[in-house]
Image (cartoon, rainbow, N blue to C red):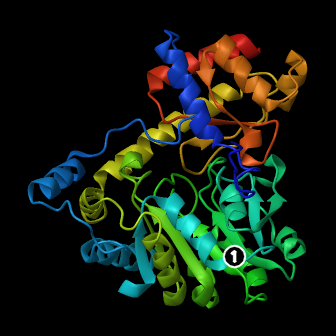
């Protein structure tokens, strides 16, 4: 029997970050001491009051189906959050809850894209954007921003990339994998271009919104360009700020018609997110926020240490981050000195020689870089940086 596989799946590849995590786990299981610096999640446990809310939900029998787009209490908490923190107003039909921020992105792409529609993606980009677009029959269009321009695209680059087929643009700030954050002034320049093209939907991936420690406070493009309101979608979730990656709760806000179509798509895939996780997310959004502030303070300390340590390695070039828990150094000169051809080979070299796991930059559309996560203990970071300096200098 010849098993048929759909055409849409053939060009796809598994998430490189997930593959790295799998290999790291396998090496550890075989007895190797590997320091993981490729993780896309905090090393902190979920706060106790959030876990308690989940336990209470189980004890009270909140274990049944919920509305497809989330329990009303959580949706209202999301609305309140947008009003209080972002000065943006939404109704119940303009927000929805999904199984993680990734599902909101998937729902969005499925809801708006037709075959051949183009989606602008600033590079470096999060690994799943291109394949999510391809699964919806869309065409990714990449705008590359190198380290010399701070990994941020310009309004001129955006203007050149827009065509009659452009349907959607993703903006991720603060950024995975670079940790950089667009200022209000930079967003206003991009918005001025987008305002000229009323058929383009603007989607902002704000999952790292609370993880900022330098520069101006978080703003998204809608704050500085309110004229984009009728075609702007905000994608967010609780996974990063509250260390809840495994709970799988994301949410979206946008025009009612679009959100309702995204809800319909979700109704035919996962249906509602976990009822228990929703009550945990409710406690996260409405509860004590001191955990978030403590985490950001710790991440800033770790960032500063890693940034300084990387600068001591001959040939590594990197810029400081404004947020997240990643830094994205250029390693081209080091690769040339060591006779290594690609960033994938370089990452393999680090696992084998330095016992450190990072993610190659090519996974994010930017070869000759690596994404280094500092979402691990300072003790691990000290050992890792010493090993890097020993094996690369």
Tell whether 253 sits left or right of 91.
right
| Residue 315 or residue 139, whichever sits in front | 139
Q: Alpha-carbon neighbours of circle 1 within 10 Å: few (<14), some, or many (≥20)?
A: many
Q: Is residue 297 left or right of residue 220?
A: left
- Residue 205 appears in view: no
Disc 1 secondary structure class: loop
Q: Residue at x 44, y 51 (%)?
A: 240
Q: Nearer the viewer, residue 342 or 171?
A: 342
Question: Could you tell me which quadrant the C terminus lies in?
Answer: top right
- Residue 384's spot in the image, x, y percent? 57, 19
Q: Quadrant of residue 357?
A: top right
Residue occupying the point 84% across, 29% down? 342
x and y percentages locating residue 321 in the rendered image: 62, 47
The reply to whether residue 258 is in sight is yes
Q: In the image, is residue 247 above or below residue 143? A: above
From the image, tell me which residue sits under label 1. Answer: 113
Image spot of residue 49 (x, y percent): 19, 51
Outermost residue, front side: 1
């Amino acid at each position: 029997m010849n098993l048929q596989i759909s055409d849409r799946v053939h060009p796809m590849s598994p998430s490189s970050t997930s593959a790295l995590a799998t290999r790291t786990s396998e090496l550890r299981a075989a007895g190797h001491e590997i320091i993981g610096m490729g993780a896309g999640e905090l090393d902190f446990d979920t706060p106790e009051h959030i876990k308690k809310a989940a336990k209470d939900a189980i004890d009270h029998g909140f274990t049944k189906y919920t509305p497809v787009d989330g329990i009303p209490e959580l949706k209202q908490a999301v609305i309140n959050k947008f009003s209080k923190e972002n000065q943006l107003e939404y109704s119940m039909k303009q927000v929805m809850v999904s199984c993680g921020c990734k599902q909101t992105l998937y729902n969005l792409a499925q809801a708006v894209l037709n075959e051949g529609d183009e989606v602008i993606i600033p590079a470096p980009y999060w690994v799943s954007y291109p394949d999510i677009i391809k699964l919806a029959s869309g065409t990714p269009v990449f705008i590359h921003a190198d380290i010399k321009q701070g990994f941020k695209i310009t309004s001129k680059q955006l203007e050149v990339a827009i065509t009659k087929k452009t349907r959607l643009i993703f903006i991720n700030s603060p950024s995975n994998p670079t940790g950089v954050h667009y200022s209000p002034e930079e967003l206003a320049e991009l918005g001025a271009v987008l305002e000229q093209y009323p058929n383009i939907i603007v989607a902002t991936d704000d999952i790292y919104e609370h993880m900022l420690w330098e520069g101006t406070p978080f703003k998204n493009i809608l704050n500085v360009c309110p004229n984009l309101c009728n075609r702007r979608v905000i994608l967010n979730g609780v996974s990063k700020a509250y260390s809840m990656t495994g709970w799988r709760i994301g949410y979206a806000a946008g025009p009612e018609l679009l959100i309702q179509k995204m809800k319909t798509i979700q109704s035919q895939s996962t249906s509602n997110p976990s009822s228990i996780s929703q009550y945990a997310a409710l406690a996260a959004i409405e509860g004590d926020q001191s955990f978030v502030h403590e985490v950001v303070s710790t991440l800033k300390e770790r960032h500063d240490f890693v940034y300084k340590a990387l600068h001591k390695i001959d040939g590594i070039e990197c810029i400081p981050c404004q947020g997240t828990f990643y830094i994205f150094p250029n390693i081209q000169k080091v690769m040339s000195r060591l006779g290594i051809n690609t960033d994938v080979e370089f990452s393999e070299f680090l696992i084998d020689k330095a016992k450190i796991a990072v993610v190659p930059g090519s996974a994010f559309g930017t070869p000759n870089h690596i994404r280094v996560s500092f979402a691990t203990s300072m003790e691990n970071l000290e050992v890792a940086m010493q090993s890097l300096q020993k094996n690369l200098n």
